[in-house]
Amino acid sequence: DAKTTQPPSMDCAEGRAANLPCNHSTISGNEYVYWYRQIHSQGPQYIIHGLKNNETNEMASLIITEDRKSSTLILPHATLRDTAVYYCIAVVPLYFGNEKLTFGTGTRLTIIP
Amino acid sequence: DGGITQSPKYLFRKEGQNVTLSCEQNLNHDAMYWYRQDPGQGLRLIYYSQIVNDFQKGDIAEGYSVSREKKESFPLTVTSAQKNPTAFYLCASSLGASGYTFGSGTRLTVV
């Protein structure tokens, strides 16, 4: 799996868009980018994933650069409940669940009132 | 509602004792995983299982054991051979590319 690099921490004002960057310069053509978040003392929560097209769901948007070497997770209107550690992971997903996810230390996002 | 249930939420163990952490899922997921998290750290993979009666070691399997006799269940035993077992333990399951579903975790403390 490709190594990912994220800033250790970020702040964002409540109501503003939170943009969380992730570098994955060695990503291979069949590796997807997954994002999870972990609120204190809970299990991580799946947010979104993508291969090369931008993706959007009810939680967030994922923007992947054309060369796929980096991506940005966007929380469009951050609330205090979005304060969490956000993990970016590059992995090849296989049907039989063989995608062993490796979680780094992620980005600690703090939403400021 | 489908999900993953971990029990107990908090567990205290005396040194030298084995303890078993429970993980049950009703999502019909094939794969299940156990992770360990230490304060301020990311998650580290202990064991994983892709199918019933089969499991593989992760990055830090020493001092742990698992079984997968049923699709729904993947218990983790922390043995006395694990030198530093105090940690937050997370169980997860997945079905292909649909992403992981995590349980709420078990916090194990050695007293």
Image (cartoon, coloured by chain):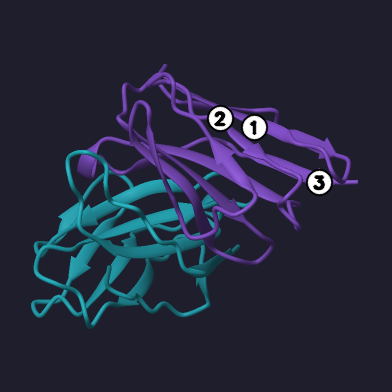
Chain colours: A cyan, B purple
Query: In the shown orientation, is residue B88 left or right of residue A100?
Result: right
The residue at the point 70 percent across, 28 percent down is B8
Label of residue B21 in the image: 1
Q: Callout 3: 10 Å neighbours few (<14), some, many (20+)?
A: some
Label 2's element? loop
Location of residue A29 in the rendering, given as x and y in whole percent from the top left corner:
9, 69
Disc 3 vs disc 2: which is toward the camera? 2
Q: Name the residue under label 3.
A: B109
Callout 3 and callout 2 share a chain:
yes
| Residue A81, position as x, y percentages in the image | 54, 50
Left or right: residue B59 versus residue B51 is right
Q: Say which element carries label 3.
A: strand
Disc 1 or 2, which lies upstream in sequence?
A: 1
| Residue B30 appears left or right of A55 | right
Q: How many labels does the image show?
A: 3
Task: Tell which of A91 and A48 is nearer to you.
Answer: A91
Label whose residue precedes the other's in the sequence (1 or 3): 1
Q: What residue type is labelled 2?
A: Pro
C-alpha separation, residue under disc 1 versus residue under disc 2: 6 Å
Residue drawn at x 67%, y 31% as measured from the top left: B20
Chain letter for mark 2, please: B
Label 3 marks a residue whose chain is B
Which part of the image, by quadrant, shows the N terminus of chain B?
top left
Q: Is residue A2 above or below residue B56?
A: below
Q: Are marks 1 and 2 on the same chain?
A: yes
Residue marked by disc 2: B75
Q: Is residue B79 visible?
A: yes
> Which chain contains the residue that carries disc 1?
B
* Badge 1 vs badge 2, beta-carbon distance below 8 Å: yes
Check disc 3 and give the amino acid type.
Answer: Thr
